[in-house]
Image (cartoon, rainbow, N blue to C red):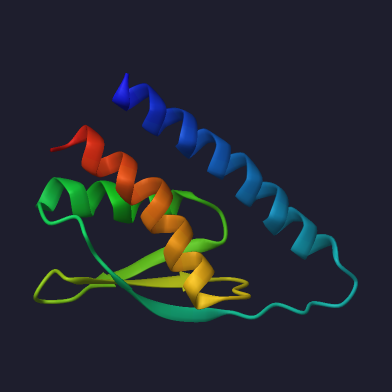
Amino acid sequence: MRWLSLLVLFVRELIVSALKVAWLALQPRLTIRPAIIAYPLTVTTDAQITLLANMITLTPGTLSVDVSADRRTLYIHAIDMASKEALIGDIAAGFETKILGVLR
């Protein structure tokens, strides 16, 4: 059931993000706020980090750029970021929590 819950969350985020990126692309004036943030990781294993990074990359509008050498930070590029804290909170409460539930 935990895998199914993670899959449902991913599909929902995929659809919502795709609609947001499409809306940005259709705007007559491009007013995006691109940013690269340092995301503090709670996940620790290679499998957990890889799954989180891939889910972020597969979600339109975000891209996992790099993982720090100490594996405590994931660098993420966002095409339009209103709030760094909101993005970190969304990932922590969504993908990361579900991944920890599945791969612990």
x 21%, y 54%: residue: 49
Instruction: Tell whether 98 sits left or right of 10.
Output: left
Instruction: Tell whether 81 sits left or right of 28.
Output: left
| Residue 4, percent from left and from top | 38, 22
Work out whether 6 lies above or below 20: above
Work out whether 77 lies above or below 44: below
x 57%, y 76%: residue: 83
Farthest residue toward the top? 1
| Residue 14, percent from left and from top | 55, 42
Farthest residue toward the right? 28
Asked whether 53 or 98 is in front, the reply is 98
Image quarter in which the C terminus is found: top left
Instruction: Tell whether 24 sits left or right of 46.
Output: right
Task: Specify the quadrant of the image occupied by residue 88.
Answer: bottom left
Number of numbered discs: 0
Work out whether 23 lies above or below 48: below
| Residue 23, percent from left and from top | 79, 57
Asked whether 23 or 72 is in front, the reply is 72
| Residue 13, percent from left and from top | 55, 44
x 24%, y 36%: residue: 101
Image quarter in which the N terminus is found: top left
